[in-house]
Image (cartoon, rainbow, N blue to C red):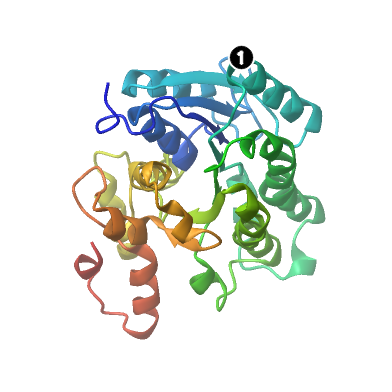
Amino acid sequence: MTTETKPLAGRVTLVAGATRGAGRAIAVQLGAAGATVYVTGRTTRDRVSEVGRATETIEETAELVTAAGGEGVAVPTDHLQADRVRALAGRIDREHGRLDVLVNDVWGGEHLIGPSFGRKTWEIDLADGLRMLELGVKTHAVTSHTLLPLLIRHPGGLVVEVTDGTAAYNGTRYRENLFYDLAKNAPIRMAFGLAKELEEFGGTAVAVTPGWLRSEQMLGHFGVTEENWRDATADLPGFAIAESPVYVGRAVAALAADPERARWTGRSLSSGQLAREYGFTDADGSRPDAWGFMIAQETDPDVSVEDYR
């Protein structure tokens, strides 16, 4: 094992919300770079969360991390329960005494989007709206509050707030409904604020967004698989810009391995932007820029997807 082939060897990382999608892929790519990766979530082989998908578990994610070359450690955790998060922090402290990378990817609110899509604030079920804020904002606040004292023990710590949309895109566009808009803009502001707080400790905080993500849940929604996902473009041509979770996984791993990553602190970044910077590709060898495509499509409906892959 060398630092050239395993640049994160010896690093201790946590991916909060690693059951599936972006979180799982980030965990696996951190493992492929040699890291120890604690993976958390609510769905285990014995229990299914409100998301309702028993096909992906944190135990499986941990096994994928280990198979990729790292050390995966599954810790069932509901990040709304502060005592459970404190227990997680205590375990990492006992076992390693440090935390080098914290990836805040907790969400699990996709099932709430459909009923509220395009509705006015007062038309949305209030419980559903507030649940989005709990899942997308409160979980991130609880996790950062509890884990950052461990991360700042050593200079060079990295916090990644995973969200949906860049600051540039979200800043001038309304994201589906008020509750979702708040839930996905909050992590961008969190990264900005944490960057200020971590500066004196030599830490870096960024927000990272995938593009149109071909998560397990999204593929299931369109009735396709990763092998035949392009079939979905017959009904939704814009889906041609979609990217696999591997892409954002490689983005975060590249950030974590970059000794000069502090230059990004406080910024909102996308998988496509980081791919251009670090030279990696998606699993199929392409380099999609979903946010660039979506912005271009607003003024030119005939813009070619291939110009953004």
Q: Residue at x 59, y 32 (%)?
A: 52
- Residue 173: % across, % down: 55, 76
Which of 91 and 179 lies nearest the eye of the viewer? 91
Which of 31 and 25 lies nearest the eye of the viewer? 31
Which of 185 and 146 lies nearest the eye of the viewer? 146
Q: Residue at x 34, y 59 (%)?
A: 272
Number of dots carrying numbers: 1
Horizontal side of 74 relative to 129 (left or right) equals: left
Quadrant including the C terminus: bottom left
Q: Secondary structure at mark 1?
A: loop
User: Would residue 162 be seen by someone viewing this image from the given angle?
Assistant: no
Looking at the image, which residue sits at the far bottom?
Answer: 299
Figure check: 122 above or below 91: below
Q: Residue at x 43, y 19 (%)?
A: 71
Horizontal side of 7 relative to 166 (left or right) equals: left
Horizontal side of 144 relative to 172 (left or right) equals: right
User: Would residue 299 be seen by someone viewing this image from the given angle?
Assistant: yes
Q: Quadrant of residue 139?
A: top right
- Residue occupied by mark 1: 46
- Residue 59: % across, % down: 51, 18
- Residue 248: % across, % down: 39, 47
Q: Residues within 10 Å of mark 1 (few under 14, many from 20)?
A: few
Which of 172 and 66 lies nearest the eye of the viewer? 66
Q: Quadrant of residue 246?
A: top left
Q: Residue at x 57, y 48 (%)?
A: 203
- Residue 1: % across, % down: 27, 21
Residue type for callout 1: Asp
Figure check: 202 above or below 177: above
